[in-house]
């Protein structure tokens, strides 16, 4: 089974091949923001893939369009769209609320 590692949390675990990164993270106890409900209409679930680009599903039209519009096409993937078929390490975003507290979750 493929291994997924999430940074900066340094959480790792085995995942089922073909599962979206968003679901993989949830199964490992990390809730990623996904404001659009996981339909590639926003970039809140964007991640930076550190290792294993070749183990992800090809980028689809909707994902490419949203990432290009945000100016992050070359550096990010959407966790709601990218499926892992082998070992992957990615860095998740850390958002802060107006009080400086970290925010994660849907």
Image (tube, rainbow, N blue to C red):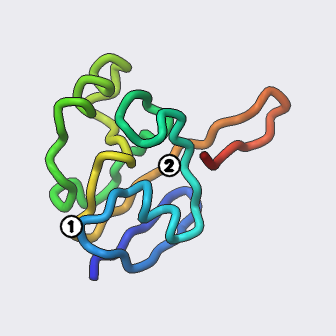
Q: Is residue 51 left or right of residue 34?
A: left
Q: Is mark 2 on a helix, strand or loop?
A: loop
What count of labels does the image hold? Answer: 2
Q: Is mark 1 on a helix, strand or loop?
A: loop
* Quarter of the N terminus within the rendering: bottom left
Q: At x 28% / y 70%, what residue is drawn?
A: 87
Q: At x 54% / y 50%, what residue is drawn?
A: 32
Local crowd size for mark 2, using a 10 Å CA cut-off: few (<14), some (14–19), many (≥20): many
Q: Is residue 61 left or right of residue 31?
A: left
The label number, if any, that marks residue 92 in the structure image: 2
Q: In this view, does 94 lie to the left or right of 76?
A: right
Q: Is residue 53 left or right of residue 8?
A: left
The x and y percentages for residue 54 are 15, 57
Local crowd size for mark 1, using a 10 Å CA cut-off: few (<14), some (14–19), many (≥20): many
Alpha carbons under labels 1 and 2: distance apart: 19 Å
Circles 1 and 2: CB atoms closer than 8 Å: no
The residue indicated by pointer 1 is 85
Which of the two residues, 41 or 43, is positioned nearer the viewer here? 41
Lower position in the chain sequence, tag 1 or tag 2: 1
Q: At x 26% / y 62%, what residue is drawn?
A: 84
Residue 93 occupies which quadrant of the picture?
top right
Which label lies toward us, 1 or 2?
A: 1
The label number, if any, that marks residue 31 in the structure image: none
The x and y percentages for residue 64 are 23, 30
Q: At x 18% / y 41%, what residue is drawn?
A: 59
The x and y percentages for residue 69 are 32, 17
The x and y percentages for residue 61 are 17, 31
Farthest-out residue, right:
99
Which of the two residues, 57 or 93, is positioned nearer the viewer here? 57
Rendered view: 32 above or below 19: above
Residue 78 occupies which quadrant of the picture?
top left
């Amino acid at each position: 089974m493929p291994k997924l590692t999430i940074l900066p949390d340094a959480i790792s675990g085995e995942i089922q091949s073909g599962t979206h990164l968003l679901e993989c993270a949830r199964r490992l106890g990390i809730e990623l923001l996904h404001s659009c409900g996981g339909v590639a209409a926003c970039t809140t679930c964007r991640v930076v893939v550190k290792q294993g680009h070749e183990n992800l599903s090809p980028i689809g039209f909707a994902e490419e369009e949203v990432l290009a519009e945000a100016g992050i096409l070359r550096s990010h993937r959407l966790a709601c769209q990218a499926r892992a078929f082998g070992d992957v390490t990615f860095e998740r975003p850390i958002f802060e609320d107006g009080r400086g507290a970290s925010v994660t979750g849907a």
